[in-house]
Image (cartoon, rainbow, N blue to C red):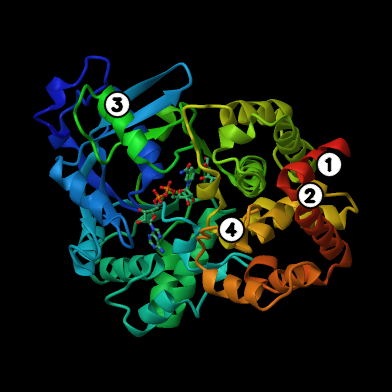
Amino acid sequence: MKLSSKTLSNLPKNIIVPSYDRTKIKSRIVHLGFGAFHRAHQAVYADELAEQFGSDWGFCEVNLIGGEQQIVDLNAQGCLYSVAEMAPEGWSSRVVGVVRRAIHGEIDGINTVLEAMAEPDIAIVSITITEKGYCYQPSTGKLAENHPLIQHDIAHPQTPKSAPGLIVEALRLRRERHLPAFTVMSCDNMPENGHVTCNVILGLARIQSEELAQWIEDHVSFPSTMVDRIVPAVTPETLDKITHKLGGIIDPVGVACEPFRQWVIEDNFVNGRPEWEKVGAELVQDVLPFEEMKLRMLNGSHSFLAYLGYLAGYAHINDCMQDDNYVAAARHLMLKEQAPTLRAQDVDLVAYADSLIERYHNTALQHRTWQIAMDGTQKLPQRMLDSVRYHLKHNRNFDCLALGIAGWMRYVGGINELGQPIEVSDPHLTQLQSLVNTSKEGPERVNALLSLDLVFGNELPKNQKFVDCVTLAYMHLISYGARQSVAKLVQGF
Ligand code: NAI
Ligand code: CS2
């Protein structure tokens, strides 16, 4: 039996189910990217608001690229799905009821998506489409005009394929129909994600019409957000456990995550917003210090553990935590090489680092190092390279960061330490493979990868100290392997 409004009463009594009237919930937010994270984060906040405070803020869920089956499955179960929080000592689950509608650009047609975004009730378009969905240049934060999807959208603005193209066209429709604009809220892991979103949308709109761009600038806001909750990709094993928790009811849209969650939001909305602060979100004037702290300390150490862990044969983050050297390296990275670069004030960064290490130990999560290692070209700049620039400027050491970057280089080399192929996943895979295949293993490979200006920009590769540190770390990885290299690094602390 599958999850649906009819089977809700068959669920075990400890599962929280919507007690509010779902017919009163309105699609007031179009969410782009119905992936694992959104299901366990923004949707849960909205569900708690409806449950505890009678809020009517609900979602129209949209997938544009990929995720077709999730939309089909969600519709088949009346837009209900479950979220399990996995603490090492036990799981707790809830059924989320705030989704009103679910559509897919390729199944339902892009026009259906555009019309949904042009509904008068829509006040917010929120986004979790992964970093690569923004079609931006990670080293500059600007629109990548030569991106194939952007090229398509410049040629065919009314049938867009990219997320920025979709938003520009939806806003054009709203303007044409004299409807109020909406707020565009990115919930992806990018520094100043609101600015990046604004850059790509205004950048594209300007190419199409200066007038439209001006209207967007005047009427749309792009609040930045810091989002945090570890939500690993759902595996068949996770789904089996979810079915077990749900007393045999099957939920293919179910997702499992850690108990922790955090959301810091820039309070800048043009057309109203849910009262997220009632359920634990922090509404602030400036998100940047929070974003920077989370991206460098959490995501930076995550990427370090992902590359060095994967190379060492550690399949999950919690496996890395069984190796004392990896724990020590992650902690050192956080406190000695990331914390000093941060603008966050009045935050106990030692306590923050300790809490992250504790979260990484969660054995229930089984968060794959391979998952975190993907899309490195989109992640390295904000997770590691901004801090490296700080250290170079202040003449400080950055051995952990250098090893993390070298770890990424070994990883995208595509062969693991046992000589087996690595399934590298990255939007710039072809370019990476060509650089790897045309360079000799060793310093030449390092230089080849450093030439990727979309990641490293133009200045870093010219900095001899940076090149030397990364090359040394890379040569250690070749000579000793990841495990020994991390151990040697830790001995030097
Ligand atoms: P996921 O793989 O489950 O979902 C990705 C979503 O992005 C899907 O809905 C897919 O349709 C969409 N998508 C992928 N490429 C796209 C493109 N080029 N254009 C438009 N849409 C595209 O991933 P998940 O776990 O939902 O994570 C998504 C993002 O959320 C992450 O990249 C990160 O920025 C953010 N995030 C994730 C956390 C996590 O622990 N999973 C925690 C904090 C933030
Ligand atoms: C991870 C993040 O996949 C990754 O790159 O580092 O998704 C991480 O799990 C979240 O940011 C935690 O909030």
Q: Are marks 1 and 2 in contact (CB under 8 Å)?
A: yes
When the figure is inspected, residue 414 is found, relative to residue 185, above or below; the finding is: below
Q: CA distance from mark 1 to mark 4?
A: 25 Å
Q: Depth check: 433 or 449 in front? A: 433
Q: Say few, some or many: other residues with alpha carbon within 10 Å of mark 4 (under 14 / 14 to 19 / 20 or more).
A: many
- Residue at which label 1 appears: 488
**Any atom of ligand 2 within 8 Å of the CB at mark 4?**
no
Q: Depth check: 397 or 176 in front? A: 397
Q: CA distance from mark 1 to mark 2?
A: 9 Å
Say whether disc 4 or disc 3 marks the residue closer to the N-terminus.
Answer: 3
Image position of 293 (left or right of 390): left
- Residue at which label 2 appears: 480
Badge 1 element: helix
> Can residue 219 be seen here?
yes
Residue 269 tag number: none
Q: CA distance from mark 4 to mark 3?
A: 33 Å
